Amino acid sequence: MNSLTSPRRPHVSPLPDGLRAESFAPTLDAEGAADARSAAHLRTTMHGFYGPWLTDEEVSRHTETFIADAQRQVGVYLDAESEEPGADARRRVGFSADHPVATFVEFDETLDAGGRGAEGPLLDARLITGVTVDPGFRRRGILSHLMTSSLARAVEDGVPLAALTASEGGIYGRFGFGAAVREAELRVDLAHTAGTRLQLRGEPSGQVISADPTAMGEVVDEVWAQFHRRVRGSVDRPLNYLRRATARWSPRDVTSWDRRLRAAVHVRDDGSVGGYVTFRHAGWETEPSTLEIADLVAADATSHVELWRHLSQRDLVARAELDGASVEDVLTAAAVNPRSVQVREVRDVLWVRLLDVVRCLQAREWGGDGVFTLWLSDPLGIADGVYRVEVSAGVAAVEPVTEQEAGQETAGPVLSTDVETLGSLYLGDAAVVTMQRAGRLSVADGAAASGGAGDAEGALRELSAIVDLPTRPFCATHF
Ligand SMILES: CC(C)(COP(=O)(O)OP(=O)(O)OC[C@H]1O[C@@H](n2cnc3c(N)ncnc32)[C@H](O)[C@@H]1OP(=O)(O)O)[C@@H](O)C(=O)NCCC(=O)NCCS
């Protein structure tokens, strides 16, 4: 390994014969209609996730936001003259040649890596989404081609990190992605008669007022901007979030207003807005009467708790459900009775793949100051190497070193791990000692390398104090 030249462009796995890949940006014509190739790409993607076949108008609405987010679509197409078995039948009953047999989408947003350095906590991230392969074309290496070529583009573009949300957990580790942020599904008891009804500690602060979601555009943007810079693990939101929060898009039909959406905002004592919540009533046929929280975003913990206090005091409802909450939502600790808040499920939400280790680690939050050496392996050869990390006043200086230099350095612990595991440590979701017990990393005492006695346990404690973070990360963005 030659750490001094990382990040390196990975080898791109070839596509099987008879297939070709095309990458393009979606467009709309003067009448607002999406071009045929990107419309077919979107419909195929939805099809892959068992979604409905979209109407032209739905395609246009989605495409407007894809253009605003500068998304690029990548499709894999069957050559027209393909003579593979079934080609004839495919021409008769299959989709038109515009339709890809595999889809892949990429765009850039920022990730809050939590760092306290001069560049702030936000790091550029290449987001990957819309990954589908037609069932008839699986396990031929199409995903491997799409993923390795996407990571190669990200390296060429100088993007330090790639991220995705995964519908299956077994696919992306091989490409160096580590599960980095988890989220919780909460069920909160609001029944006025129940002993477990949510009641919050402390005195109320400010007031919560009902809001017209269609008038909330500016508030949503302002609150989101503060949240995004406050919460480690947050990924900036694509435009569809604003459309949904302001009732422009209803959940099942993006061409119609969301007439059931309700909203409330928390107004602080100084008159500023500290957070918003949007929600719907599940319908009177649902027992017990339930509020489905669509989005709850706050600039600080006080507004977060006050929005929940407001929800807990509403009449006619006995339960609130929130799909994507922090695994450490302060709500449980703020509740008089912690059983008011039930965690129904915890699942991974964000996976990250470090490409430029120096930039990623320099943008990260650290638990404490100190020095250590990182020996990193990477099956795709992008980021492997040896790095010297020195954290001072919470900010890291990271430098690639040669193996010889690393051998001469004896100060601090020596961490050996792979890029997938580093992804899971990166935002503070996993602890060093957990990964060590799982056999996914080893920690040695640097002094042992030069013939000293070495204190492996001490080195593990020292490294944990530098790397581990006091809170778990959270990501309120699905993409
Ligand atoms: C998941 C999916 C994209 C894989 O595409 P594919 O072209 O068949 O994948 P490849 O042939 O390139 O396989 C690459 C590797 O991943 C493995 N793999 C593929 N799908 C996998 C899965 N669902 N679970 C575990 N491993 C998987 C393959 O065995 C192969 O391993 P190898 O390199 O050790 O041989 C495809 O099955 C699909 O479209 N699934 C439905 C939609 C979906 O789940 N998308 C993911 C959204 S996050």
Image: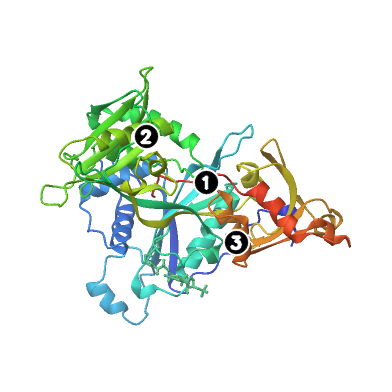
Numbered disc in front, either 1 or 3:
3
Identify the mark at residue 322; answer none if there is no mark: none
Identify the mark at residue 201; answer none if there is no mark: 2
Three-letter residue code for mark 3: Met
Tell me the CA gap for discs 2 and 1. 38 Å
Tell me the CA gap for discs 1 and 3. 25 Å
50 or 476, which lies in front?
A: 476
Mark 1 or mark 3, earlier in chain: 1
Q: Is the C-beta separation of discs 1 and 3 under 8 Å? A: no
For this orientation, the residue located farthest to the bottom is 85
Name the residue beneath numbered marker 1: 125
Query: Which quadrant holds the N terminus?
Result: bottom right
Name the residue beneath numbered marker 3: 435
* Relative image position of residue 178 (x, y in whole percent): 53, 58
Three-letter residue code for mark 2: Arg
Q: Is mark 1 within 8 Å of ligand 1?
A: no
Q: Secondary structure at mark 2?
A: loop
* Relative image position of residue 260 (x, y in whole percent): 17, 40
